[in-house]
Amino acid sequence: MRKILGILIAFGLTFTIMTPASAAAKQGIYQLDFIPLSTNLGEITLAEGEVKLMVSKLNNAYRAITNGKFGIELRSILPGVKTSDPMKSVTDMTKLLNPTLKVDTGYAGAILIGYMPRDTNVVFAGQAQGNQYVLLNFPINESFKTLMHEIGHNFGLAHAGTAVCSPTDAPSTCAAIEYGDYSDFMGNYVYGNPPGATVARTSAFNLDNLGVLDSSQITYVDTSTTLDLVPVYGTAPGIKLAYLPILGQRGYAIEYRPAIGDDLQLMATEVPVPGTNSYYPNQPSHGVQVRLLPSVAQSYKSAAPTITYSGFQDISKNSGFSGAMSNLLEKFDKGRQGMDPGESVKLFDGSIVTVLKAEANIGASISITRPLTTMTTQFAPNAVSARWDTSATDLTYEDTAKKIALIPPTSTSALPVIRVEYKLPETAIRLLSSELIVNGTSVLSANPSELIYNNAGAPLITPSAAFTYAPKSLGEYKVSIRVKDAAGVIVESPAIILKSKNPDLKDYTDLCLQKKGWPATCSAYPVFQFSFCDTFAQQSISLQTGKKYKLIREMKGVINPTACTDGKNIYFYDFVGNYPDPKLAKAVYKTSAKATKGRVPSEGFFTIVLKKGKR
């Protein structure tokens, strides 16, 4: 009698602790460090030959599906560690080891894999954390699919589930299985389970999340159309992934996975284990595949089906999983994943996907009917903000709202830049373009990737974008955001007015000292001040009135070596007074000293000039 292998053990139940670090993966070669973790269940070692063989298989498999953009290399087998504490999760491993993983120059990253004695009371065969850690609870030589899956988590991939959705119009419901996708090693890729397995594949959606597909292989279906898809793992040029945008995010992903070549097993109902009389049950998953993508936008969440998860782990209680994974749509009799010619599926927004024809070695033609929508693309109130960059140290503002920047005429700093931040407006399908408009002219355009919610990233981040614009001169700038949606409708946000200018000129009246050989100094009317050093200990200060001088002050000099430094003029005088008459254009003052024994009288003159103007 042939033996049916149990799914729980052979499948290698795996899950990840999702952290922000697992949201993105850098392309390149990753270094693997293995460490044996002996527990109360027994001592454990790692044979170098087995580890090298497994790493070689993982490297070949990842290079094959990513066209060489991701590779894996063994760096070391570390000395084993023994612990008496239970090893129930990857968190227990990181607490025990407290590792600090360094990445060698030239590599994209490093991953530490802890290898523990098989514990049947632990529900997983492998568990990943972030982008650097894996705990393996399964024999190393049987862990190909498990390690492909866990390293996929390290690369930022989420679980690949399946969903059976009600055929009624929205609001609809879907019954989903967390690991239900039999065509993806992030789901239940049975073909990767046998000990000799060397092939493991994932969806085109996940290949896009890894950055493997180029722009010529991806399209967005905004309106009703007929579309040709080439096989995901074929070599022919063409579209491998079609997104159906809904309410500003990618709602569904469509691809063609024919049962040919290394994907031949996608049509099998069982996968035999070579050299044994046993097999793994398999669910056919070939043909045109339609995946419901994770909800991100709030409006999309409100309209999307209510998904109830089941399977190996009830992730309806864990938003870290249900918020990030995709679900391959199954037929309603649960007998097949994927569609053949003549079959169709109605999606929750009313779109209908119909398979017209399919040739395994060439591709599939599909018809996509998108419903008409009455939703209007519009900016939410206060969705756009614009401000002057505040990094300039000499920047001040004329108003409390800081919309009018004042730049000193003598400033040597660059002109301040305008920073614009905005929240994308809600739209029925998606936005095609977003431009920064300044004084009626488009000056900058957003990257298309900024205009749609990214299902692969942190799912709770509201999509927003930013522009930085550097004006070439001072002036008034009317700033707005102009978007164009998939229906060709152009919407522009209300303009925000920013101004930059020199401070307004103000009236001034200055009193400026003029005396030959003295530096010119000015002070604000009506007070003026002048200081001088002299050889006489007393001085008289007189103001010219007509042809005569009128004494206004007698002063005694103060010996001040700090102010009077020539050693001769040792007496310091500091005169402060009010300007005599604002009608006078200038006032002439005389300093005089009386003759003393052996010295003749001394006198000098200086002028205070009244100056008026704007500055």
Image: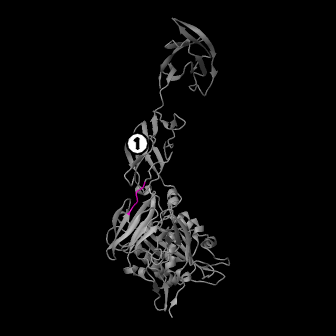
From the viewer's perspective, is residue 480 above or below residue 241? Answer: above
Q: Quadrant of residue 287?
A: bottom left
Residue on which the image places disc 1: 438
Q: At 46% across and 85% down in the image, what residue appears?
A: 271
Q: Is residue 69 visible?
A: no
Q: Residues within 10 Å of mark 1 (few under 14, many from 20)?
A: many
Q: Work out whether 457 lies above or below 422.
A: below
**Main secondary-structure element of the magenta-colored stretch:** loop
Residue 535 lies, in percent from the top left, at 58, 18
Q: Does the magenta-highlighted stretch encompass residue 517?
A: no
Q: Is residue 526 visible?
A: yes
Q: Nearer the viewer, residue 410 or 350?
A: 350
Q: Quadrant of residue 209?
A: bottom left
- What amino acid type is highlighted by mark number 1? Val
Residue 62 in the image: state x and y as whole percent: 43, 74
Q: Nearer the viewer, residue 110 or 164?
A: 164
Instruction: Give the mark count.
Output: 1
**Identity of the residue furthest to the bottom in this view:** 1
**What residue span does the magenta drawing correspond to?**
369-373
